Amino acid sequence: MSFQPVDYYGVYNQLSDEERMVRESVADFVDSEVIPIIEKHYQDGTFPMDLVPKMAELGLFGITLPQEYGGAGANYTSYGLAMQELERGDSGIRSFASVQSSLVMFPIYSYANEDMKNKWLPKLAAGTAIGCFGLTEPDFGSNPSGMITNAKKIDGGYLLNGAKMWITNGSLADVAVVWAKYEGEICGFIVEKGMKGFSAPEMKGKHSLRASVTSELIFQDVEIPESHKLDVKGLKGPLSCLTQARYGIAWGAIGSAIGTYQSSLDYAKSRIQFDKPIASFQLVQDKLVWMLNEITKGQLICMQLGKLKDSGLMNPNQVSLAKRNNVDIAIQCARIARDIHGANGILQEYPIMRHSANLESVRTYEGTHDIHTLILGADITGIQAFK
């Protein structure tokens, strides 16, 4: 039976036909292809590679990019709705699509030369190539300007040295968008699998995002051709990519919250204690109402953010508010859901613990909760508290 959307304020009634079609098609995909298999992959610590061509067929990679490069030419509200439904399935599946679209295809489309666009974008859109994004380093996460990875000019190109960490899709990737310091400025480079000195060992031992590949990227005198340097300088380059990804995360977190809420509602109506369903008790109803209340507010934030982005009026601080709020309430929804499910909440039969563990990573990556607090604080007061 198809998943029934949680839409207490009728926000989906405002969608265009195209936006509605995107949401419904991705929702059906999640119901039929993701949810039946994701728990096993999470337990095994593997990414379901067989989903990649199916996601590509749905147009989930580079969904907002022009069709000439393999994209779907859709708007950002459609992209957000797709990310919401993917994360209702699992954060790792949404992360894969977010990285491919926002952190790899977006910078190649925005900053690479035409040859690089034509070489990589159609393959990435078709899922025949996988990309990753290298910004975070072992000692530099929230402070990317302190990065150590560096590039030096050589005949015909650049010599790249350094390391990146916590890289989604790194060990799977055919191409990496990597940020390094060149002559004191942060610059972007396209690094291809098989380049001598480039390796991407997988990171193991995770309790979170287990159905996702996380890797290190290591560069030891990697020769990068001149044509592989992106046409952007400074933090503007990587931060523009992060804004794209954070936008998708804000939507995705609501999908996770919807998943744990719906499981809780169904469970509360069917679980009998003291000769009646636990949904009949005031404390349980209070928990369900809190979840619905916060999900509805998060949906309204995302819908307005999508309108702003589609009209070109969105600013990165607004994305910070959405990411910060929606991930936070999704984590709280997962914890409340665990309480409603009682002991059964720890079983893989229910999605609760998987969502809860995944969201601990989502809270950290693409700017931690505290970093977004400081971004917003600086914006509304005009005073930077982190310098």
Image (cartoon, rainbow, N blue to C red):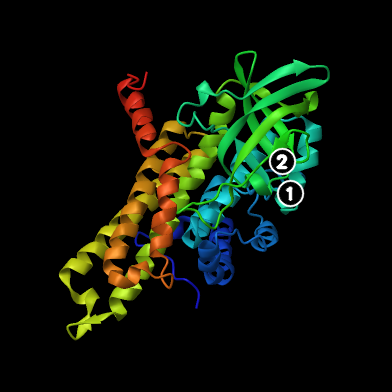
**Front in this rendered view, residue 231 or 331:** 331
Disc 2 to disc 1, how far (Cα)?
8 Å
Residue 344 percent coordinates (x, y): 33, 72
Quarter-wise, where is residue 158 in the image?
Answer: top right
Q: Is residue 154 visible?
A: yes
**Front in this rendered view, residue 148 or 374:** 148
Task: Name the residue at 38% across, 63% down.
Answer: 260
Residue 241 percent coordinates (x, y): 57, 35
Residue 253 percent coordinates (x, y): 43, 52
Q: Residues within 10 Å of mark 1 (few under 14, many from 20)?
A: some
Q: Is residue 296 visible?
A: no
Q: Is residue 175 left or right of residue 287?
A: right
Instruction: Say above or below: 74 vs 222.
Output: below
Quadrant location of the C terminus in the rendered image: top left
Task: Name the residue at 28% across, 57% down.
Answer: 293
Question: Which residue of the protein is positioned furthest toward the bottom in this rendering?
Answer: 275
Q: Is residue 33 left or right of residue 189?
A: left
Pointer 1 residue: 129
Amino acid type at mark 2: Val
User: Mark 1 or mark 2, which is nearer the start of the sequence?
Assistant: 1
Quarter-wise, where is residue 157 in the image?
Answer: top right
Q: Is residue 278 left or right of residue 191?
A: left
Task: Name the residue at 54% across, 33% down.
Answer: 136
Q: Residues within 10 Å of mark 2 (few under 14, many from 20)?
A: many
Residue 233 percent coordinates (x, y): 62, 20
Q: Mark 2: which secondary structure?
A: strand
Amino acid type at mark 1: Ala
**Front in this rendered view, residue 353 or 257:** 353
Numbered mark located on residue 175 in the image: 2
Q: Are marks 2 and 1 in contact (CB under 8 Å)?
A: yes
